[in-house]
Amino acid sequence: MSILEIRNVLVERGKREILSEVSVQVRTGELLVVLGPNGSGKSTLLRVLGGLWQPSSGSVTLDGRALPAFSRREIARRIGFVPQDTHVDFAFTVSELLAMGRYPHRGRFSSETPADRAAIHAAAEQCDIVPLLDRSVDTLSGGERQRVLIARSLAVQPEFILLDEPTANLDIEHSLEVLELADALAAKGAAVVLASHDLNLIANHATGIVLLQSGKVIANGSPEEVLTPVRLEQVFRVRTELSEATDGARSFSFQRLPQSGLPSVRGKSVAGPAGSRS
Amino acid sequence: MSETVALPTVRENANRSRFSLTIFYLVLLPLVVVILLAGVGIGSTSITWPTIVRVIELKLLPSLWTASLSVSRADNVIVWLIRVPRVVVAFFVGAGLAAAGVVMQGLFRNPLAEPGIVGAGAGAVLGGVVSFVAGWSARSVITLPALAMLGALLSLVIVYAMATRGGVTPVATLLLSGVAVSALLGAGSSLLLSLNIVNWQIAQDIVFWMMGGLDARTWTHVWLCAPFVLVGVLAAVIQTRDLDLLQLGEETAASFGVNVESSKRMLVLTAAILTGAAVAVAGMVGFVGLLVPHAVRLVIGPANRALLLASAVTGGAFLVLCDICARTLHPPTEIRLGIVTALLGGPLFIFLLLRQYRGADGQHEHP
């Protein structure tokens, strides 16, 4: 089992603290959700975990060894990162993009091995994009592109996979597909860290939740421990009602607090996408 | 997956327009041969094809085979000492500029970036101007290219140092400092020109240099340019995987194992060497490095290893073609090469630009 851990991490940009005193641990086999409103530091936390941003203070360790002591390629082989922004400037084909997922494993001149091809094909099947392989990426929809980028990181076959709001561009069906894929990866022994602000989507999938607010960890534990109405009201500033279906699946409905921000339409309840498929 | 089926047919067609590399080279290579031969065959003195072939045979084949051949001394000089080196230099200049363009467009993630974007072009031009003004270019054929190369590398160092803070060089800052330094160096070249305008010989040399040209290029120029272009293209080929990933953004590149900052330094240096080598023997020649990679990418796609080699060959052939035009469009005067590339390249570039804007509009249909 591998452990990726950050301890007492502080990240500053200019004078602003984006993360402060954040400690998070993720082990292979877990699906850890980083939950928080916009601007709470979810993306930054993922970048620190992936070694893409250096914290101003605090430590990031992989199996007890400091992350900066690993080479970029070693990190790339073990930790995959899927950014939130799926825009691709150049018209690569889907196959070409997936092939890039094998670069951390290949020498500069070595050609594709059967193992490379197998990894690429498995990743494409897992993400349901085999029919898209010959398509140019600029002809894909946002959801298709998202799945292609997830597949590219899976082609690396990393132990840890960091997904930055992977469902932001997806419809409900594909969102649930991504969550199920994350479940499956964790079940197979990978560690998945997924940033999201969609409570309903993640409530029934996460093995652990880190709740962030303004760069600080508010709560860290199992979904049952973290997702309490009081805490959600404090962090998301909405009144939350939790309902449990007969099969144990939980879903939330929300109502704006009267005093918050813009004038609210009183009594109008906004239910999130149903998360009852589990 | 219903989306796959529901896509408009136009998009499908756009995808199919990407040719396989084999077809691309099957079309390109015969064309390159024809252009190279035309470059040797066409000129102010008419020389028959059998004579040209005989001269080339005499030079390239073992002497046993060619003992029975004979050509006049004049024909020999015109073909082997004037036309062939000129075509070879043109080819390497075009190849170098196009390869540098591929690197820069990938690095800046912008299909409209050009080789001189980090100041190497303007630096090389200024280096050349200095050697004219100082009178060094008259003394040895090597000083002009050497100073141009030096100018290219110096300006690169200045631009890179300006754009770097704490070991990090954001490409946006690099681009801006490149533009600023290029403008300054360009002003320097113009200043030296205007200060020396009374000295007509120097002024003419400078003006011709700033317009680019390949008149009176010899085998010496081939040896001054070709090794740098070959080394540069090879260095670029070694870095194409990093370039592929950088083309998708620095964060993505880092997450797939690229050492972003050192990789950027090496790529920019490679492009500067290629640009410097090209400008050193041809003066300022625009549009080739911008247009050729862009056009080739539209045909064979953005994967950099294939794109780099295909662009180098295409760029070489394109510049030989431009040089033929420069020699023959308005005899007996030669039109400067930079003018021809701009006249041919400008409209083509506008066409591609408009096409790209239309493409960008089209994307809104598919969020």
Image (cartoon, coloured by chain):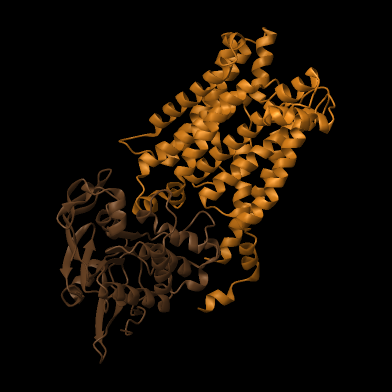
**Which residue is nearer to you in this view: B203 or B78?**
B78
Q: Colour of chain A?
A: brown
Q: Residue at x 58, y 76 (%)?
A: B6
Quadrant of the rendering where the N terminus of chain A is positioned: bottom left
Asked which quadrant contains residue A230, the reply is bottom left
Q: Can residue B343 be seen in this view?
A: no
> Where's residue B137, x and y in %?
59, 12
The location of residue B257, given as percent across then percent down, is 34, 51
Q: In this view, does A214 lie to the left or right of A164?
A: left
Figure chain in orange: B
Picture coordinates of residue B249, whole percent (x, y): 42, 51
Location of residue B16 with respect to B136 vertically, above or below:
below
Query: Which residue reaches farthest front?
Result: B64
**Image coordinates for residue B18, horizontal then vertical, percent:** 62, 59
Q: In this view, does A149 lie to the left or right of A22?
A: right
Q: In this view, does B29 lie above or below A117?
A: above
Kindly identify the residue that appears in the image at 60 percent across and 37 percent down: B95
Examine the rendered structure and indicate whether residue B68 appears above or below residue A147: above
Q: Which residue is drawn at 34% across and 39% down?
A: B168
For residue A140, side relative to residue A236 (left or right): right
Identify the image quadrant of residue A149: bottom left
Front-most of residues A92 and A24: A92
Q: Residue placed at 54% from the left, 21% from the top?
A: B148
Q: Which quadrant, please, contains the C terminus of chain A?
A: bottom left
Say if residue B263 shows up in the picture.
Answer: yes
